[in-house]
Image (cartoon, grey):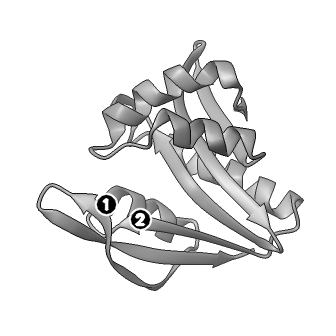
Amino acid sequence: MRPMQESDVEEIMAVERLAYEFPWTIGNMRDCLKSGYCCWVYSQDKRIIGYAVMSVAVGEANILNLCIHPDMQGQGLGRKLMDQMLMLARQQQADTVFLELRASNRAASTLYDAVGFNEMGVRQNYYPAKKGREDAILMAKVL
């Protein structure tokens, strides 16, 4: 794992588009990188297989995106990437980490439960979906 670089963005976006039906735009990703967010990539054999984006301010961290290439999911790589983000949040003096996930994303929910996140609430109709909108589950972890 290493900090994300501008030269990684095209490869990251290829993974993003494979992993999500409603992916971030390249502008979203570049804006996070330019804004100084905590942006990291996970690579194997010089190929990016995952990435994470986290903002940290005033004692709070927000994981905005955490993704593993669909072909590499289910191998514990998401857990390793999450552990890295939690370590970085602690290093930046965050005492709580927040995130949102689609209500239908069972794999992510299982990971977040396993690392100690707790459900805090629901944002109704938050995410775009094939048929309208989907709720977001708000989760938090005290560090």
Residue 132 position (above or below residue 64):
below
Q: Residue furthest bottom?
A: 121
**Residue in the foreground of this view, choosing between 71 and 53:** 53
Q: Is residue 3 left or right of residue 10?
A: right
Residue 44 position (above or below residue 53):
above
Residue 29: horizontal and vertical position, in percent?
57, 39
Element marked by disc 2: strand
Residue 87: horizontal and vertical position, in percent?
78, 56
- Few, some or many residues within 10 Å of mark 2 (<14, 14–19, 20+): many
Quadrant location, the C terminus: bottom right
Amino acid carrying label 2: it is Leu
Residue 72 position (above or below residue 31):
above
**Residue in the foreground of this view, choosing between 53 and 2:** 53
Q: Quadrant of residue 75?
A: top left
Q: Residue furthest top?
A: 46
Residue drawn at (42%, 35%) of the image: 16
Residue 76 visible in rendering: no
Q: Is residue 111 left or right of residue 33?
A: left
- The residue where tag 2 is placed is 101
Q: Is residue 108 left or right of residue 93?
A: left
Contact, CB < 8 Å: mark 1 with mark 2? yes
Amino acid carrying label 1: it is Asn
Element marked by disc 1: loop
**Residue in the foreground of this view, choosing between 143 and 122:** 122
Residue drawn at (83%, 63%) of the image: 90
Residue 12: horizontal and vertical position, in percent?
51, 28
- The residue where tag 1 is placed is 105
- Few, some or many residues within 10 Å of mark 1 (<14, 14–19, 20+): few
Marks 1/2: CA–CA distance: 7 Å
